[in-house]
Amino acid sequence: MFLKKSSTTINGKRYHHYKIVESYRDGNKVKHRILFNVGTLTDEQAEQLRLALQVQSNPSLVIAKENDIVVTKSLSYLNVMILHQLWQQWNLERFFSEDRWVEALVINRCIDPTSKIRLQSWTANTILPAVIPALRTYDEYDVYRELGRLAKQEDDLQVFLYEQLKKRQRIHSEAFFYDITSSYFEGSRCVIAKLGYSRDHRPDREQIVIALMITPEGYPFYWRVLEGNTQDITTIEALVRDVRQRLGIERCTLVFDRGMVSADNLKTIEQQQLKYVSAMDKDEIRTTLLDKVMPDPATPEDWEQVVAMREFRPWDENEFLFYRPIVLGDSRYIVTFDVQRFLDQTKHRKHQMQNVEQSISQINESLRNAKKSRKSEVVEREVNQLIARKGLKKQAKVTIEPLSLTVATPKGNTRSVKSFQIKLEWLEDQIKNAARLDGLTCFITNLSMEEADDREVIEFYRRKNKVEETFHEIKSHLQLRPMHVTRTERVKAHVTVCMLANFLMNDMEVQLKAANHNCSLIDVLDDLQSCQLHRLEITTSGRKMLKVQEVSDQQKQWLQALQCGEVVQEKFKKQVLKKAEGWL
C-alpha cells in the first residue's frame, strides 16, 4: 500500500491529486487498485501520509512525537569495542579462554580504572556483557579467583606475548630496554612489601619493586614483581636466565640503567653471549676514565678549547654534544660531553654555594643575637644537613668557633650566654675535582664497532627513556596504585593487568603513529567514549530499541588506522545489537 500522485493541467494551471493504492497480481502482471481517493495535499501532508503508510506495512517503523522518545540507558561502545578487537587481534582471548574477567579488568584499566569490587558495575555500563555473555552473571569472588590464576600464568603469558610480537613482526631490533621501579602501599600490608629505595619519593611507605623489559617500540613482554628492598644490581642475573632459558632469545642487546652496572653483572651477560649497553655512574667514571678524558675541569669560558684538546668529536653541526670513544683492555667506552648540561651544572653548583653562604650568614646572625646558650652539636648538625642538602658535603669545611655573649636580663642585670660562629671554607681542590664531571656521561658496551658504531650505542641508551615512559603511563593513567589487594598473588596479578593494558594502549599508539596520527592517545580514547550504544523507548507505547551513535569523520580515520573499521559496519552492529537485546 502506497501513496500515488497524479497530475493534470487545466487552463495552464497544474493540479496534483493523491490516491492510496495497493498492488495485486493478475496472472503474470502486477496491477494497481485504488483504495481511497485522497484529493489534493500539500507536500508536507503528502510526506506525513507516506510515512503513515510505511508504518502500516513495515513493523520496524514507528511514528511518535519527539517528546515521547527518551534514552533510558547508554553503554560505552566504540572505545570498548576497539580494545576488544585489539584483544582478539593479539589472540589473547585464546590464551585466556577459561577466564572471563581478565579482559574486562584490562579494558577497565585502559578506560576508567576502578577497584576490583566495582568492576562488575562498571562492566554493566559497557557493551562487554553483550560480546562476552559470561560476564552477565557475577559472583563477588570470581574476579579474585581469576587474579589467583593469572598470577600462576605470568611466565606462560610473557612467552605468549613475545611469540605474538615475533609472529606479527612487531620486533624490529635485537635491543631490549630494561629498568626497575617501585610502587608503595597505603595501609594494608603485603608479604613482599618492604621498606627500600623509593622511586616515588615515599621512603616512609612499604613498597614492591617491579622489573620490566620492553621492545624499542614500547611493548612490555617481561616483568617481575619483587620484594620492596630488592636492589637494582641484583636483578640482572635472573633477567639473563629468563631471557635465555624461558623466552629462548639467542641474540639480543640489553639496554639498562647505570644503577645495574657491576663487574659481576657484565660478566654474567657476557658468559651468556649476550650484548649490553649501559652507562657508568659518576664514581665509576672518576676511578676509571676521568684522568684520561678530563684531567682538569672546563669552565664556561674555555670549554671549547678543553673539548678540542681532549679529542672529543662533535655529534652534529650544532656542536651541543661531543663524544669520544675509548677502549681500555677488553672494555669499550664512549664518553659524551653535553654543553648545555655542563653549563647548567656549573651554574647550579655556583648557585648552591651562594645559597649555603647566605644561609650560614643568617645562622651566624642568629647566633650573635642568641638570648640563650646554644649547643655546638646542634649547630654543627644543622649546618651539615644544610650543606648535604645542597650536594656540597665534600666541597666544604665547617669550623664551629665558640662565642661568648653578654645578655641583659629583664631585671636590668646581665648574664653570659654561650654561642658560636660558623666558619665556612670552600675546598677548591674538591670543587675542581667535582667540576671535572660536569656535562660528562660515559656509556659502556660489549658491542663491537661492526655491530654498532659509537653513535648507535649512544642512540640505544637515549631510547631507553621509553621504558621510563612506560612506568609513568602505568602509574598515572593506568593507576597501578593505590592497590586494593594485598595477597602476593593478587598483587602480582594486578601488575600483570596493568602491563596488559599498557600493551594494548602501546599497540594503539604504534598503529596511530604509523598512520600519521600524532595526537595524544588519552585524547583519542576520550573522543571514542562519545560514541555509545543507546537504548531508546517510546513512552506512549513502551516500545524499546537499540541504536549505536553515528561516528564522526575523525573517529572513522582512527578506526581505519587501528584496523577496527568493522565495529561500525551495519552487519557487525546488527550482530552486536542482537546479542545486546537478549541481555538488556
Image (cartoon, helix red, strand yellow):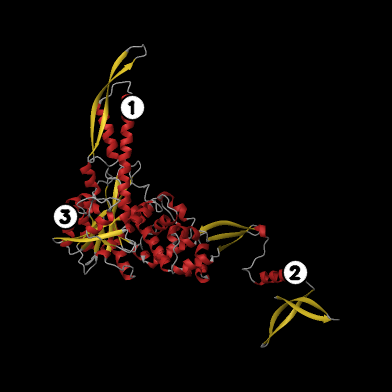
Q: Which comes before the other along the chain, label 1 or label 3?
A: 3
Q: Which residue is mark 1?
A: 366
Q: CA distance from mark 3 to mark 2?
A: 90 Å
Q: Which residue is mark 2?
A: 45
50 relative position to 357: left or right? right
Amino acid on which disc 2 is placed: Gln
Q: CA separation, marks 1 and 3?
A: 50 Å
- Of residues 220 and 414, the one nearer the viewer is 414
Disc 2 is placed on an element classified as helix
| Residue pointed to by mark 3 | 263
Picture quarter containing residue 386? top left
Q: Which mark is residue 272?
A: none
The single residue placed furthest to the right in the displayed view is 11
Quarter of the image holding residue 221?
A: bottom left
Q: Which secondary structure, mark 3?
A: helix
| Location of residue 413 with respect to 325 vertically, above or below | above
Choose mark 2 or mark 1, whichever is in front.
Answer: 1
Q: Give the CA separation, mark 2 to mark 1.
A: 94 Å
Query: Is residue 414 shown left or right of residue 558?
Result: left
Is the residue under label 1 in contact with that under label 2 (CB below 8 Å)?
no
Residue 126: where, in percent of width, then height?
48, 58
